[in-house]
Amino acid sequence: MRRSTVLLLLALSCLFVDAASSFAAPPIAAPAAFEQAARIAGADAFVVPGSFSRRALDGNVAEYSLRLRVGVGAREVIGLHRVVKETSPGHPVRAAQAIFLAHGDAWGFDAAFLSAVASPAVPDSRALPIYLAQNGIDVWGIDFRWTLLPADAPNLAELANWGIATDARDLGIGLAVARGVRLGTGQGNRKIHLLGWSRGAQTALVYLGAESQLPPGLRQTRGAVVVDSFLKTNDPEVKAAACARLKATEALLAAGQTAATSGQLFAAIGSLAETNPSGASPIAPGFTNRQTGLLAGSATYIFLPPGQSFVPLYHFLGGTFDSAGLPTGLTYTSEAHWYDFLEGASPLEPNRLLADGDAPICEATDVPFDDQLGDIHVPVLYLGAGGGVGDYGIYTTTLLGSTDVTVRVVRLGPPVARALEIGHVDIFTANDAPTLFWRPLLDWIGAH
């Protein structure tokens, strides 16, 4: 963790009072509170002028968003979000508990966690941040810097160095600013829970390992939620797949291809399925655009080269198939919501980040990202989906130093039906997600 994070906590402890009193929380004072916390976090961190915005969400919940410059480079910018219940615009309710969300591959904060707001197919309330905010949790989140790049961004050579350590550093800055703003708006001095989903969970584990090397009083997090992901495995098949992906990605990097464009593929699949469902797919010959959209969700593993699926039969959504094996629908998530979700994908992602995520799983070379797993002692909740990473993510939790580990893997069918199980994205989009995943998360937060 950077020295600026230490300075943040020391300075803010002097600048702001603890919120143990019963006074109403001060206004958010946009963007002054963010600017104050950002500048204390380091001389190279400040709010990008004109980037601050507020939008009303369901009921009396609002989202505040801004962009934060975290370095001297023009592209060293992250997005920061706060979803909070208010007594009136700009005045958050007092929330003793807070959580910071780190998204995974392709989809930034809004696209990953607030997709219901962008989709007319479902109520806005069917979004995890809104659900948590309505239940008294102060919700924060990040857009990692690469999600802000446009598809036609020139000169992508610098992405060769944007790996998991970069994202972990940016995550630490986001956490520091969030905690500082909470202090400044009367929310108290409690540490923040950190939730990472998918690639974001890998990044969160790397960050937590680095944070564990600081004195306890200078750490930001009070608990960790690992959602359907892993950083280590004891399964030979899963390890071999990671090694195959790592070899392929390193070859791309060696050839100068620094950015993956899978987000553009996802967005195109979603757009075609929504606007021309019966048309012939240009992406998957022999299928219609709708069938391709359904396959991307319910049989995600077929879009990966043979032997490179993250885990066997890995898929985003539980689906249905006819006797010929052709997709016919989705079991848990609205089909229209899924296509809207797909369309929210960011166009570019660093190949270095993808390689860094596979390296500690493969173990072909020694990397530092898994060196401090045993030093992570905060309470941990592992939340998995039976058709996503599911049980394959449990092993990583056994390598942590924490003695308070809760495991919840949602399975709605027998093990032999893994291909039809609730999936990796269903955690946030399924009609029953509040009951199956979000309520247990809320209960865990309340207990920690």
Image (spheres, helix red, strand yellow):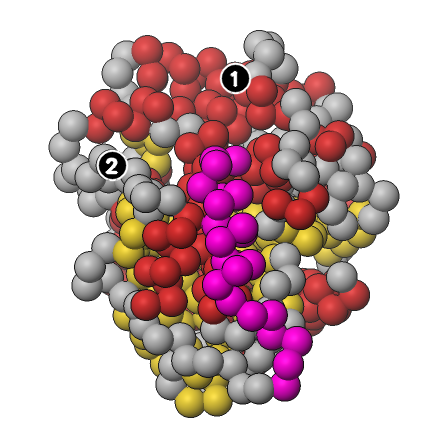
Residue 4 drawn in magenta: yes
In the depicted structure, whether residue 190 falls above or below residue 168: below
In the visual, does 263 lie left or right of 83? left
Residue reaching furthest to the right: 403
Q: Nearer the viewer, residue 366 or 49?
A: 49
Residue 127 relative to residue 219: left or right: left
Q: Residue furthest front?
A: 14
Specify which label sits upstream in the sequence, 1 or 2.
2
Q: Which span of residues is magenta-colored? A: 1-22
Residue 59: % across, % down: 46, 87
- Counting other residues with Cα less than 10 Å from the Cα at mark 2, is it few (<14), some (14-19), or many (20 or more)? few
Q: Which residue is mark 2?
A: 72
Helix, strand or loop at label 2? It is loop
Check residue 24 for magenta coloring.
Answer: no
Residue occupied by mark 1: 244
Who's the residue at 32% across and 68% down the image?
32
Front one among 284 and 424: 424
- Position of residue 90 relative to residue 194, above or below, is below
Res 261 → quadrant: top left
- Determine whether 61 is above or below 228 in the image: below
